[in-house]
Image (cartoon, rainbow, N blue to C red):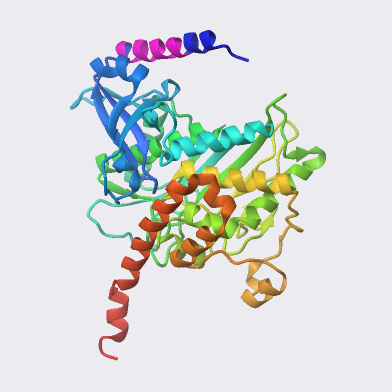
Amino acid sequence: MIGESERSWTDRARRESVLGRVAEADVRLIDLQFSDIVGGAKALTIPIELLAVVLEQGYRFDGAALTGGHRKVELDLFLMPDPETLAIFPFEADGQRRARLCCSVLRRDGQPFAGDPRSVLERNLAAARELGYDYRVAVEMEYYLLPGDGTLPDRESGAGYFSIADDQIASTRDAVLTSLQGMGITVGGSHHETGPGQEELDLPDVGALRMADQLITVRQVIRSVARRHGLRATFMPKPMEDAPGSGMHVFQSLYRTLDGRDTLGAEGNNLTQEAHWLIGGQIEHAIGMTLITNPTVNSYKRLNAGHRAPRYGTWARVSQASLIRVPNWLETDRAEIELRSPDAMANPYLAFSVALAAGMDGIRKRTDPGDPFDESFVTFDDEEFLRRGVSRLPSTLGEAISAFADDMVVTQAIGGYISDQLIAVKRDEWESYRAHVSPWELQRYVDA
């Protein structure tokens, strides 16, 4: 076990490493990055001269910024940077060199603030480690590059799946990859998806906390690069009625903390018993998790539309319409469990927290997921799924709010503070949507 003096020396060495790297790169500004409860990127910028003190003591700020729009009282909290998250942005000729550090939010006494999504994920990862598990994830994130003039592309325009896109989109994709690599964020493949201007970016397997940190930054970089290329990036799950939706598929790995062995895969491309229990837990809590993994009104238009988006709580090895899919793996690789419901508007800290908590609950209770459901969904209607005991995911944000409030495992995973705040914010969003009169309604009913 690491002693107090050794931990202090390690922390000091990490701080000195950060200071040396930013000095060498001539960084002048530091963005202290954090996340509000609904997943929005937040940042407080400091000059480089303050960095040494902030690395040691944190930076006081108004924590009301965490509430996702419900600013009622000021909360004196502290941003505490994680030295291991330093990323230096590529140099821009028209501005000063800047870097970012991801921060956890602490109270004055140094304890994690209950309303900080990053601290919530740290707590859930620690709970999993106490059970002997290390949780890691890889991500496939889809998004659209739209014309910068505010219009939507023609559904028939653009390249097809894995096709060579036009020069503007292709150069934007290349710039995204180059920027992320330059910041030290490892990326996998990137390619054109099936929709007009739809792209996919793959982020290889890392610890869940590091992945959540990266996703907040990746979305910012994609938006910034798109603007510079005359485009507009959107992570809306369903930006066009007649085009495929965009998901954020999460490939989950589980290792034993004692020896680093894969916990999910057995010989012959078979799953371990623990893998089945983890799947069982995520299926059991799928309905309650949906508010976190699919947090907007628009999210449910993607889920309801299908096209490789899940509508039911099933698992499979083949079907891409399942909530959970188990890809094949090589003998030299590790098994993964793919959760297909999330979209990129989810708060990644909270999404990983509830997925992990649901999986750990399944392992603790030895939840049987049933047989894999590899049949085509086209042949079954809701009544048949109901007869087979398959649960349907919420079809609206309103249903998801109610289901979330009723799932104690999910609400306890993110804590009472965030649960209450999230329900309040999302109820306001749902009621606002229900009150809105859309162009579709006017077209349909104004002369009826």
State whether residue 407 is above or below residue 178.
below
Residue furthest bottom in the image = 448
Locate residue 64 relative to residue 279 in the image: left or right: left
| Nearer-the-camera pick, 6 or 21 | 6
Q: Quadrant of residue 84?
A: top left
Residue 443 on image: x %, y %:
28, 81
Magenta stretch encompasses residue 14: yes
Magenta stretch encompasses residue 430: no
Locate residue 208 relative to residue 222 in the image: left or right: right
Count of labels in the image: 0
At a point 71% along the width and 45% down the height, the residue shown is 363
| Nearer-the-camera pick, 275 or 444 | 275
Q: Is residue 188 visible?
A: no
Locate residue 206 relative to residue 328 in the image: left or right: left
| Nearer-the-camera pick, 410 or 163 | 410
User: Magenta part of the protein: which range?
Assistant: 11-23
Q: Is residue 87 visible?
A: yes
Residue furthest front in the image = 109
